[in-house]
Amino acid sequence: MTDSDYPKGAQSIQRAISLLWYIAKRNERGVTLSQIARQSGINVATVHRILSALTQEGLITRDPLSKLYHLDFGLFLLGDAAHQYSIRNQFRTLLEHIAKETGDTVFLLIRSGNDVLCIDRVEGKFPIRTILIDIGARRPLGIGVGSLALIAFLPDDQFETFLSANATRYLKYKNLTPKDIRNLAAISRKKGYVVSKGLFHDGVTSIGIPMFNRRKEVIAAITVSTISQRMDQKRCQEIFRLVKKLIRSEGIPLK
């Protein structure tokens, strides 16, 4: 395909990405051209041109009988090449072991710009599940224990940069302020992990543990979450020690 075959300008790129996200969220059942156009507010002809370009590039596919659009294999190849998937693969076995040992829900999170991005989740066998964030979901860095663990152990100047960037966004989360996040970070540095008892989610206690590479840089964070009645201070410490033990047995360096 030549450049002349594509809709022009940054607006077209933004539209194409938004249509991909819309299809992704409905990928299991599929979605029609008219549904996409109606939901996006873009006229049918423009949507059709964008979808045709995405189809030719192997990012989406259209079933000729049902006329439903789905994601195509090209997106899998792009995703497989992304850095977060190498991290996900690196930590997957560890997450499974933590979930098995604790019975609780375990999340894997990384930084993405000024956001935290959840890239994996494993549910334990405890009957009351705490699903705090979906895979692929984003929040401002600092909101959530794993999110805070990603920045609390950074050098002060980097930590403050993230706080400043997200200051106004924090207000949407129980009117939290950079001062609130800063205070919790200071406590967390002394412990080596972050704990929240109902601060970010009512009735839920979570522990966020930073993951370090061999250069002592924070590359990811693991969150273990459950109902508050099940997670007292003693159990938080036990889980922290368990995670460190499992990390060492997996050969993953921890600060």
Image: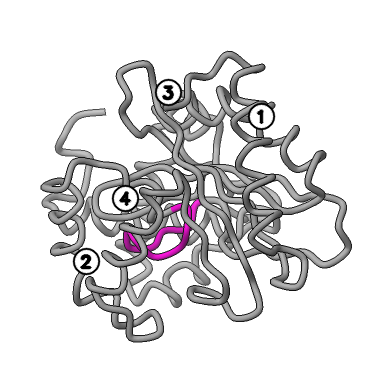
* Camera-side mark, 2 or 4: 4
Comes first in the chain, label 2 or label 1: 1
How far apart in space, not on screen, are marks 1 and 3 (Cα)? Answer: 21 Å
Residue tagged 2:
166
- Residue 247 location, x and y as percent? 60, 25
Q: Which residue does the numbered mark 1 point to in the structure image?
A: 94
**Dots 2, 3 in contact, CB < 8 A:** no
Residue 174, compared with residue 71, is above or below; it is below
Placement of 177 over or under 20, stated as above or below:
below
Q: Give the range drawn in magenta.
A: 136-146
Q: Is residue 190 magenta?
A: no
Way the structure is coloured: one colour
Q: Alpha carbon of mark 3 to alpha carbon of mark 4: how far?
A: 28 Å
Asked if the residue under mark 4 is in contact with the one under mark 3, i.e. CB atoms within 8 Å, the reply is no
Residue 100, quarter of the rendered image: top right
Answer with the quarter of the image where residue 171 lies. Answer: bottom left
Q: Are marks 4 and 1 in contact (CB under 8 Å)?
A: no
Above or below: residue 15 compared with residue 155? below
Q: Taking 111 as reference, is 195 left or right?
A: right
User: Which amino acid type is shown beneath numbered disc 2?
Assistant: Asn
SS for callout 2: helix
Residue occupied by mark 3:
81
Q: Nearer the viewer, mark 1 or mark 3?
A: 1
Image quarter hosting the N terminus:
top left
